[in-house]
Amino acid sequence: MIAQAVHNEFAKMRHLRVGPLVAVMVAGVLAVTCRELTTPGFLESVDDPAGQSWQRLLASMAFAAPLVSPILIAVLASRQVDLEHQGNGWLFSHTSGLPAGRLCRTKFLATGAVLGAATLIESALVIGVGTLVGITVSFPAGQWLAYTASMVVVNLVLLALHLLLATRIENQLIGLGIGVLGVFLAASGSGMQPWLAHLTPWGYYALATPLDYRGEVLASITPWHLSIVALAVVGTAAFLLITRRFDRQEV
């Protein structure tokens, strides 16, 4: 039954034109990241280890993701749930044996698969661009993969949050407004004290960042990987708990 429900959600996504929306997110992150290619001296240093070409692209991607992803994740979640509000889909699904909480979990599985794939594609495209412009220095695979995995976790937690908000609050403008606020929190996260960044899911974009500028010098910093793991655990537990409460509520 779950497999059929997930299949139905993918069918709904085709009608909702989720593909173009996700493509905008990928293109937005890629475009902002690739601005680094136009900075003075970048193309001249692609074969110089001291130029830190890959690290500069990774730092640029870590700057781009918090600017682009939060609002588009909010829109993505809103589109998935508003369909149920407008078409009385909650009642129809409930009578078909799929109560609200289970439907919400199904939406997360389907939409999360698309969002997770989009996040991986973003990272792969940036690597592809770096290769195309001729970067020949050693690729920081461990640093890059750890950051990409962290971004998948943060994006999925935000998706879960916005699915819950969109399910609980019928006025989708509220969720979108929170998404806009999230952009501000995510973009300013690097300037926050770590304890403050831990207080909101958007702050974890900054906590996952492996590089930062100290003046004009790009330096490696230690990401809060354990905090990202804790976010995944707490986010999963909270999502399951809340959606199970949805299952027990009357439609």
Image: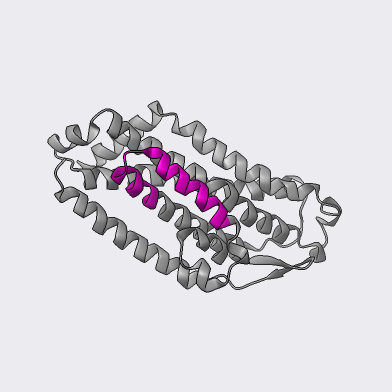
Q: Quadrant of the C terminus?
A: top left
Foreground residue, 47 or 243? 243
Foreground residue, 213 or 128? 213
Q: How is the image coloured?
A: one colour
- Which image quarter: residue 54? bottom right
**What is the total number of numbered labels drawn onto the structure image?**
0
Whether residue 114 is visible here, answered yes or no, is no
Residue at coordinates 34% horizontally, 34% vertically from top-left? 82
In the image, residue 250 sits, relative to residue 185, either above or below, namely above
In the image, residue 66 sits, relative to residue 189, either above or below, namely above
Measured from the top left, where is residue 124 in percent x and y?
59, 48
Q: Is residue 175 magenta?
A: yes
Residue at coordinates 52% horizontally, 62% vertically from top-left? 203
| 41 on left or right of 35 | right
Q: Quadrant of the N terminus?
A: top left
Dominant secondary structure, magenta: helix
Foreground residue, 156 or 71? 71
Foreground residue, 56 or 192? 192
Magenta residues, start to end:
160-186
- Which image quarter: residue 23? top right
Residue at coordinates 64% horizontally, 72% vertically from top-left? 221
Q: Is residue 19 magenta?
A: no
Whether residue 86 is visible here, answered yes or no, is yes
Measured from the top left, where is residue 129 in percent x and y?
69, 45
Measured from the top left, where is residue 165 in percent x and y?
35, 48
Residue at coordinates 50% horizontally, 42% vertically from top-left? 72
Measured from the top left, where is residue 77 in percent x and y?
40, 42
In the image, residue 131 sits, relative to residue 76, either above or below, namely below
| 215 on left or right of 221 | right
